[in-house]
C-alpha cells in the first residue's frame, strides 16, 4: 500500500516511519525547499519517548537529551520555590525517561530514521488542494496519488480547511513566545550567569500575564529560555526575529537575570501561539489529518510534539497489514480512539494559560498552594505520561 504524507515535520515523519516499518511505500511532501527545523527546547514526557522508541528514533537523540531530575515551579519576582515535582522516579513509574531536547535535534533524529527506511521525501512540494476520496494531493510539482493521504501540514493545514471549510480556522490564543538560547560554556565564564550553566532541571517561572520555561538541552551544552507572554498578535506571519527591546518591557519586576540575559542574547525569536477547537472528525474518504492539523494546542502542558508522535504511531498501528480497500473503513477509527485524549490535552493546555498567568493575589496564592500539595502526587501525571500509543512497550 502507498501512503502519501503532507508535511515533513514531527507528526508527518512519525507517521511515515510508522507505516514504512510495516513495509508500506511512503512518500512525504514538504513545501519547504530544505529539510530541518530550528526552534526552542522542549520537554518530552515518557509517552513521547515511548513513541520514539517504537519508531526506532531514540539512538541518535539519546546522546543529545538531558534528563532533568526535577521540575520546579518558581515565583516570578525572586525565584522562590512554589513547588518541586520530582522526575527521578519517572523511569520506574512509566517505563521511559523524561527528556529535554532541542526541537531541531528531535526532528533530525526522525529524519535520519526516515531516510534509513528509504522513505522518499520531496521538498518544494507545496500542496494547494487534495481530493480526499482518491487520496490525491495537487502540488506545485504536480499531482501525487496514494492509497491513503495523511495531512500533517500544521496549524494552517490546507487539508483541514478543505475538510472543514470555515469552521476550523486556527485561533490566536492571546499569547506570544520569545526564545533565546546560550552556550553553557559562555554562561560559566560570566560570574553573573554561571549558576544557570549548572542547572540541569526544567523550571517554570509563574507571573502575572506571563510565564518562563528554562531548560538545558543538547547534552548540557545549551541553555534555553522561552518567555510565554500575553500580548497582541503580530500583523502578519507567525514568527520573526525579536530583540531585547521587544522583550524587556514585559520583564518589569521579574527575576533580574532575565532582563540581563536578554541584553546579552545574540538572537531572539518570536512566534505567536495558535490553537484550534477540537474537530468532530479527522478523516474523509482516504484522507486523514494528524498533529497540529487535527488538534493544534497551546504548549502549556508540554504535549504538542508528544501528541503528534502518538498520532504517528497510532496511524501505523491502525493500518498495519491493511490493504487499499480497508482504508476508508479504518481511518475514522483514528479519531474514535484518539480524540478524547487530544481534546483533553487541548482543553487543559488552554486552561493552564489562565492558571500560569494569574496576577498576585488570593487566586494566585490558592494556585500556589495547590501546586505544592499536588507536587508529590504521581497520579496527576499518570493519565498523560502513562498512556497513549507506544506505552505498550513499557519495560
Image (spheres, helix red, strand yellow):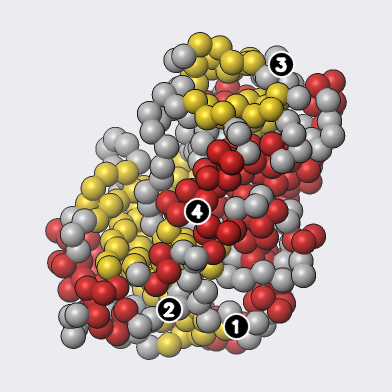
- How packed mark 3 is, by other alpha carbons closer than 10 Å (few <14, some 14-19, many 20 or more), is some
Q: Is residue 16 above or below residue 361?
A: above
Count of numbered tags: 4
Numbered mark located on residue 88 in the image: 1
Q: Earlier in the sequence, mark 2 or mark 3?
A: 3
Q: Earlier in the sequence, mark 1 or mark 2?
A: 1
Q: Nearer the viewer, mark 4 or mark 1?
A: 4
Of helix, strand and loop, which one carries label 2? Answer: loop
The Cα–Cα distance between marks 4 and 1, rounded to whole angstroms, is: 22 Å
The Cα–Cα distance between marks 2 and 4, rounded to whole angstroms, is: 19 Å
Q: Earlier in the sequence, mark 3 or mark 4?
A: 4
Q: Which residue is mark 4?
A: 106
Residue 26, percent from left and from top: 64, 29
- How packed mark 2 is, by other alpha carbons closer than 10 Å (few <14, some 14-19, many 20 or more), is many
The Cα–Cα distance between marks 1 and 3, rounded to whole angstroms, is: 49 Å
Q: In this view of the protein, which residue sits in the foreground, 371 or 376?
A: 376
Amino acid at each position: 500500500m502507498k501512503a502519501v504524507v503532507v508535511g515533513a515535520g514531527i507528526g508527518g515523519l512519525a507517521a511515515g516511519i510508522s507505516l514504512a516499518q510495516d513495509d508500506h511505500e511512503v512518500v512525504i511532501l514538504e513545501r519547504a525547499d530544505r529539510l530541518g527545523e530550528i526552534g526552542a527546547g522542549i520537554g518530552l514526557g515518557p509517552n513521547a519517548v515511548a513513541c520514539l522508541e517504537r519508531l526506532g528514533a531514540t539512538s541518535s537523540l539519546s546522546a543529545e537529551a538531558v534528563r532533568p531530575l526535577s521540575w520546579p515551579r518558581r515565583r516570578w519576582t525572586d525565584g522562590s520555590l512554589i513547588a518541586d515535582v520530582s522526575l527521578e522516579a519517572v523511569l520506574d513509574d512509566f517505563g521511559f525517561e523524561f527528556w529535554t531536547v532541542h526541537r531541531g535535534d528531535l526532528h533530525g533524529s526522525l529524519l535520519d530514521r526516515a531516510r534509513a527506511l528509504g522513505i522518499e521525501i520531496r521538498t518544494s512540494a507545496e500542496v494547494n488542494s487534495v481530493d480526499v476520496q482518491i487520496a490525491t494531493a495537487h502540488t506545485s510539482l504536480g499531482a501525487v496519488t496514494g492509497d491513503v493521504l495523511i495531512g500533517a501540514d500544521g496549524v494552517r493545514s490546507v487539508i483541514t480547511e478543505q475538510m472543514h471549510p470555515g469552521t476550523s480556522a486556527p485561533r490566536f490564543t492571546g499569547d506570544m513566545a520569545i526564545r533565546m538560547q546560550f552556550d553553557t560554556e559562555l554562561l560559566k565564564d560570566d560570574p553573573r550567569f554561571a549558576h544557570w550553566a549548572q542547572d540541569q532541571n526544567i523550571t517554570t517561572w509563574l507571573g502575572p500575564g506571563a510565564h518562563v520555561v528554562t531548560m538545558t538541552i543538547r547534552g548540557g551544552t545549551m541553555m534555553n529560555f522561552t518567555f510565554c507572554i500575553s500580548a497582541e498578535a503580530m500583523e502578519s506571519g507567525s514568527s520573526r526575529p525579536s530583540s531585547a527591546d521587544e522583550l524587556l518591557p514585559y520583564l518589569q519586576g521579574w527575576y533580574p537575570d532575565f532582563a540581563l540575559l536578554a541584553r546579552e542574547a545574540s538572537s531572539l525569536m518570536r512566534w505567536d501561539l495558535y490553537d484550534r477547537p477540537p474537530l468532530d472528525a479527522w478523516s474523509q474518504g482516504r484522507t486523514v489529518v494528524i498533529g497540529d492539523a487535527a488538534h493544534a494546542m497551546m504548549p502549556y502542558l508540554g504535549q504538542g510534539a508528544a501528541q503528534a508522535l502518538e498520532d504517528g504511531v497510532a496511524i501505523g498501528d491502525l493500518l498495519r497489514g491493511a490493504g487499499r480497500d480497508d482504508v476508508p473503513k479504518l481511518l475514522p477509527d483514528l479519531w474514535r480512539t484518539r480524540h478524547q485524549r487530544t481534546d483533553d490535552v487541548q482543553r487543559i493546555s488552554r486552561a493552564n494559560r489562565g492558571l500560569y498567568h494569574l496576577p498576585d493575589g488570593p487566586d494566585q496564592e490558592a494556585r500556589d498552594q495547590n501546586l505544592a500539595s499536588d507536587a508529590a502526587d504521581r497520579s496527576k501525571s499518570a493519565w498523560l505520561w502513562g498512556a497513549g500509543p507506544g506505552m505498550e512497550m513499557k519495560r
